[in-house]
Image: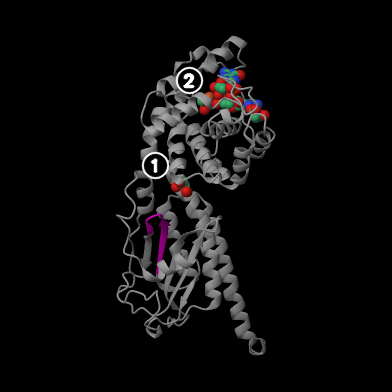
Amino acid sequence: MQSQSADPLAARSAETETETQLDAILRVCASLTAPKPLEALLDNLLSEARTILPSDAAALYLADDAGLHLVCSQNDSARHDIRAALLNREVLGRPGGQNADPADPVASHVAQTGQPLNIVDVHTLGDDIPYRPLPDHPLLGTHRLVSILAAPMIDRNGKTTGVLELINRRDTNNEVVPFSSRDEQTLASLCAVAAVSVRNARLRDLLSHSHLDTILRLASAAEFRDGDTGEHIRRMSCYCEAVARAMGRTPEWCRTLLFASPMHDVGKLAIPDAVLKKPGPLTPDERVTMQQHTVLGAKLLAGSNNEILSMAERIALGHHERWDGRGYPHGLAGPEINEEARIAAIADVFDALTNERIYKPAFGFQEAFKLIAAESGRHFDPVVLDAFMSAQEEIESIYEAYRPT
Ligand code: C2E
Ligand code: SIN
Ligand code: SIN
Ligand code: SIN
Ligand code: FE
């Protein structure tokens, strides 16, 4: 305390540095929240980290079930190794583990403990520590490895989703120095921003991924007929997946739902244009015709051993049933309606409400959210609805990623 205030110049320079770091973090926040493909975002993130905390090299690892994967790294001489290994494995369903990178011991240790590591000098580490860095660290090029700061990226559920690692802090004289405790705080802030941005970018990438695209194209046939671009079913299926995840369903089940739910309205293929494209309200007869899209869709999808198609069949049939028994086609109530259809019902109505239809204008996000909430125990299963509410942040990211124009 005393020594700091005794030297006004030093105090001022420390203050200025803090301001600079804060400014930089705010700038990173702004740049990372703008939609970008994951690769561009990660590269951007590492450059910013190395500007705020000048250092020789930086690396970002993402975690999945198979372990930690180096997805992006930089040093003075090169930016390289930008890979979306994680996404490819997830979406293409490659067997986990096979593509796992040889683990960096420091990053692995941080991922396992969920705690940051600040290594002042790797040459003074004892022999018995569990995170001994690799002597020929692949990131370093010609530099000699000295100081390392690595911190976990932690998501909203407290799960470590990645690790950001910086190597060899440089001071203003370009000397290699240890990372300070302020550096630790700065990196923690960056990691918090990174965790959210990476999650959003992965969602957006998932929405546009080619594997899903094939299914969506087929499923879109019905939608294209009434002028939609297929985005309704993209969003709708992502809402379904988010809700299922919030309900604690297994990742496999969530994934099946993600791929099955886009087909909920395929039965509309069989509905005459005069009804489907009618700009105004339907007559009672037309409504009966329209309601047939559930039964017709289920018929189209019936009889498959494929898990995705059989779930799609159940969703097509049940997505307009209501919790209170006043839905169609069978007037089932409560748990008589299968769970995937109860989830799809909320996702479908929420997306219908937030978008323009040939027969109605769009509601805003908040308004639609309120309308949905008011239907607890009436249109919608209260338990599924609670999950939908608890996933609001994620629902909003999906809504924003494909914002209706
Ligand atoms: P959709 O447009 O995808 O709507 C799906 C569901 O979202 C609707 O199921 C309804 O539960 C809900 N929904 C959509 N917009 C609103 C709204 O403004 N207010 C309220 N309270 N709920 C809304 P629903 O009613 O069984 O309709 C199924 C499908 O039938 C609709 O799919 C649409 O394709 C068609 N449809 C429904 N009403 C009309 C209409 O008045 N005119 C025309 N042309 N088609 C309609
Ligand atoms: C995400 O988690 O961001 C995308 C959805 C998934 O991977 O299951
Ligand atoms: C649309 O999404 O606008 C058309 C499909 C539907 O009405 O459900
Ligand atoms: C429903 O369609 O029953 C829920 C949405 C609303 O009340 O507008
Ligand atoms: Fe429908």
Q: Secondary structure at mark 1?
A: loop
Q: Is residue 64 magenta?
A: yes
User: Magenta-highlighted stretch: main secondary structure?
Assistant: strand
The foreground one among 28 and 105 is 105
**Residue at screen point 31% across, 77% down:** 135
Contact between labelled residues 1 and 2, with CB atoms less than 8 Å apart:
no
Q: Find residue 137 and report its horizontal and vertical position in percent.
A: 32, 72
Residue 360: tell me if it is visible: yes
In which quadrant of the rendered view does residue 331 lie?
Answer: top right
The numbered mark, 2 or 1, whose residue comes first in the sequence reads 1
Q: Find residue 277 and report its horizontal and vertical position in percent.
A: 52, 17
Q: Is residue 339 magenta?
A: no
User: Magenta part of the protein: which range?
Assistant: 58-67
**Which image quarter holds the N terminus?**
bottom right
The foreground one among 246 and 75 is 246
**Residue at screen point 29% across, 75% down:** 136
Q: How many badges with numbers are in the image?
A: 2
Q: Which mark is residue 209?
A: 1
- Identify the residue under disc 2: 268
The foreground one among 34 and 240 is 240
In which quadrant of the rendered view does residue 337 lie?
Answer: top right
Relative side of 310 to 31, left or right? left
In which quadrant of the rendered view does residue 206 lie?
Answer: top left
The foreground one among 151 and 228 is 151
Q: Residues within 10 Å of mark 1 (few under 14, many from 20)?
A: some
Q: Which mark is residue 342?
A: none
Q: Name the residue type under label 1.
A: His
**Residue at screen point 32% across, 47% down:** 94
**Which image quarter holds the C terminus?**
top right
Q: Name the residue type under label 2.
A: Lys
Residue furthest top as drawn: 285
